[in-house]
Image (tube, rainbow, N blue to C red):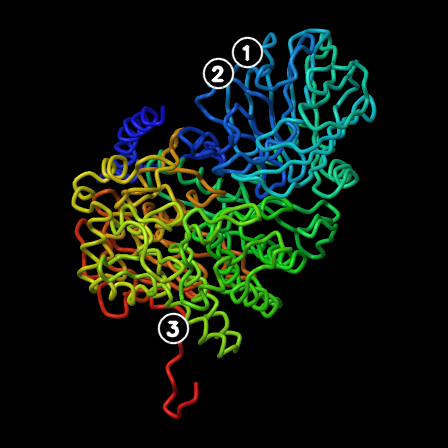
Amino acid sequence: MPWLRRIRLRTAGAVLAAVLLGGALGAPGVRAAQPAGPLTDLVNPFIGSQHEGNTFPGAAVPFGMVQLSPDTGHDTGYDYDDDHIRGFGSVHLSGVGCGLGGDLPVLPTTGDITETDYAKYAAAYRHDDESARPGYYRVGLSSYGGITAELTATARTGRQRYTFPATGKANVLLNAGQSLHKTVTTRVEVLDSRTVRTTLTGRGFCQDTEPYTVHTLTRFDRPFASYGIWDGDTVTPGARSSTATGRHGAYVRFDTRANRTVEATTALSYVDAAGAARNLRAEGGRSFDATKAAADAAWERRLGVVQATGGGTTLRRTFYSSLYRSFLAPNTGSDVDGRYTGWDKRTHRARGFTYYQNWSLWDTYRTQAPLLSLLAPRESRDMALSVLRIGKESGWLPKWGYGTVETNIMTGDPVTPYLTNAYQQGLLTGHEEEAYAALRKNADGVPPATSPAVGREANAEYLAGGFAPYVKGRTHSKPGDSDFDHGASATLEYALSDAMLARMARDLGHRADADRYAARARNYRSIFDPSTGFFRARDEHGAFTGSADPARSEGFHEGTAWQYQWLVPQDLPGMLDLIGGKAAADRRLDSFFAYPELLKDPGWTARQVWVNGPYDYDNADKYNPQNEPDLIAPYTYLSTGRPWKTTDVVHAALTLFTDTPAGMTGNDDLGTMSAWMVLSSIGVFPVQPGTGTWGLSTPVFDRVDLTLDRRYYPAGHFTVTAPGTSATDRYVQSVRLGGAAHDRTYLTTADLRTARELDFSVGPEPSAWGTGDGAAPPPVGRPARPRPDGRS
């Protein structure tokens, strides 16, 4: 029952919050010694696998095409509360909210093949016989006489090692017809005595979507003794090939009385069978142990770009686990030869870059994309180029893309701040005008009916009247969500994107466009209702509609007017003026964050007052740290002149992240929540996503050293220090940037490129730091003021 799960979450969370606050953030006078050994030892892949964090514990390398992980029956793959494993699927996404992936679940069994439904032949397991670390997963299956399964991965292959009991009927089941989404059609072929090939076409993510196809090739380390294929309930020993639309798969059988170990490598391709074969040849030649060691080394290099000093053991494990999840997506989409399937269903080749796929842009543009632009700029550049390829080949930029298809899940215009962020971070050198043209098309139009994309679906009405109308229950003929059904939040998202595009247009010399977009960036005002003092949806005729109670408002996507009121990062001074100025806004923020209660007990407030459940989006007047719309909200205090309150709220929210399976706050959404934790722990946060502006709050570590790519950050490193930071000494007394006093509550990307050190002095009480005029992040994208000679 959902309410029982909620009580269990809160009770356990209260205890863990107390541990985190006292140990992880640091008790007074206690500084933890840093553990010797690799950073990969600190990562717990099980974090978020309980209570709808929807993470996966299986094996992957950074940004890999393959995520080989157990599926237990939860609609997104693995749930820590389940006790049976249905198979080890090759594709998973970290923290998505709907079933997706799980292609080709493979499971070792023994005995005769009597069941073909993986819910019925699933194997039992216990957590005390299960472990995981970056690039490796192991579990003891207590069914079928006891089988040990081990998993590791390369970018495009998943490697399995099964240790069976001594038997003449050791099976490996390759289930082509069941996955986490709807299977359309599958083909299975036993090519020879060591190789099985499949072609899987599936569809569906939250709603029915366009189908996509993935090709797999699985090669075993030794010949199998026999094999067969099942179609529905019919099992046909010796059958070599079959095409089906339902339950469908192949089994291969080994004699393990002399040799109990069987290894297999599965390669994927979204292009064709030949691509899977090339990927297997290129990446499948190592032994299991060598592959595991290479995956571990890849993760150690990736995690090593951030060296955190100080903090308790729990905090360090939680931090590096969050950093790990931040590097899981987007995912490699091109084969080793550069070929990939575009959204036009044609085969293309990426030359000079890696093509990536899987775009949860509504989520990731706020935190994960800026983090990757800082810590993985070369990959981020390729990711941005991949998004431009999608626009070029399909005719429209993506919104929420999976594999080779657009799902149109979520609303607004998230691709604009995603790409303007890439531009501002210097990742689009040589492609600036190409990116601008694609964004201009997206910002000024609506995709035609023949396009699978919906883009800015309500754009015509938005451009004509200044707002996207709310039409309750409105749908369209394409898969996905409708901006009309979330008109109020779509208006705010469009306006945010317009501001970011205005800055890019001005930088590139498109002055008329810049002024036009800057004017549109103020369209958030069109849905402000003076009678309530909050944003409110308007209907097709312009009348405010829905409940006047901002906690019960309609027309906002996964949130309320309380939570969306702060989503105006492009013009916080203007928004604060609407609600009565800084003092009035400060009082409203205090109510929103339950600030008096928070000061008394941060962990309790976060767990008992803020958190209502991973999918409780409605009827709320408090901060929802489990969802994206108000992730930036704690940093609004920087604009009211009370930056110490940002630190109080951020540090309270950090108690929601722990190193247990329940240690996520809501769905991770392809690293969005994890990146929030990483950035907020460091004390540098993208307060205006789509720009190069980073808000400041007190770090939770004494020191963090960032190794930066000299191609984009000439200094090659950036160090953040906060000696003595703790749960009590958490207030900024002063800041120095590159050795000089710094009174602003933000940095720019230019600062990160030129300065090498950001030093915080902290103490037990708030100070006057960051409270002066001009200390807060300035507005973005306002129209240029006329020059004295009248020229623009």
In the rendered image, the quadrant that contains the C terminus is bottom left
Give whichever of 155, 334 is nearer the camera: 334
Query: Badge 3 local density, few (<14 within 10 Å), some, or many (20+)?
Result: many
Query: Badge 2 local density, few (<14 within 10 Å), some, or many (20+)?
Result: few
x and y, in percent, of residue 727 in the image: 24, 42
The Cα–Cα distance between marks 1 and 2, rounded to whole angstroms, is 8 Å
Residue 782: numbered disc: 3
* Pointer 3 or 1: first along the chain: 1
Q: With respect to residue 566, does 112 lie above or below?
A: above
The Cα–Cα distance between marks 3 and 2, rounded to whole angstroms, is 58 Å
Q: With respect to residue 424, does 341 lie above or below?
A: above
Q: Amino acid at mark 1?
A: Ser
Farthest-out residue, bottom = 789
Residue 463: numbered disc: none
Point 71% across, 37% down: residue: 283
Give whichever of 523, 279 is nearer the camera: 523
Asked whether the beta carbons under mark 1 and mark 2 sit within 8 Å of each other, the answer is: yes
Residue bearing the label numbered 1: 142
Residue bearing the label numbered 2: 126
Q: Seen in the image, is 89 located left or right of residue 130?
A: right
Q: Seen in the image, is 731 located left or right of residue 519?
A: left
Point 16% across, 45% down: residue: 596
Q: Quadrant of residue 318?
A: top left
Q: Seen in the image, is 665 located left or right of residue 552?
A: right
Asked whether the beta carbons under mark 3 and mark 2 sit within 8 Å of each other, the answer is: no
Q: Quadrant of residue 224?
A: top right
Secondary structure beneath disc 3? loop
Farthest-out residue, front = 541
* Pointer 3 or 2: first along the chain: 2
x and y, in percent, of residue 145 in the image: 60, 7
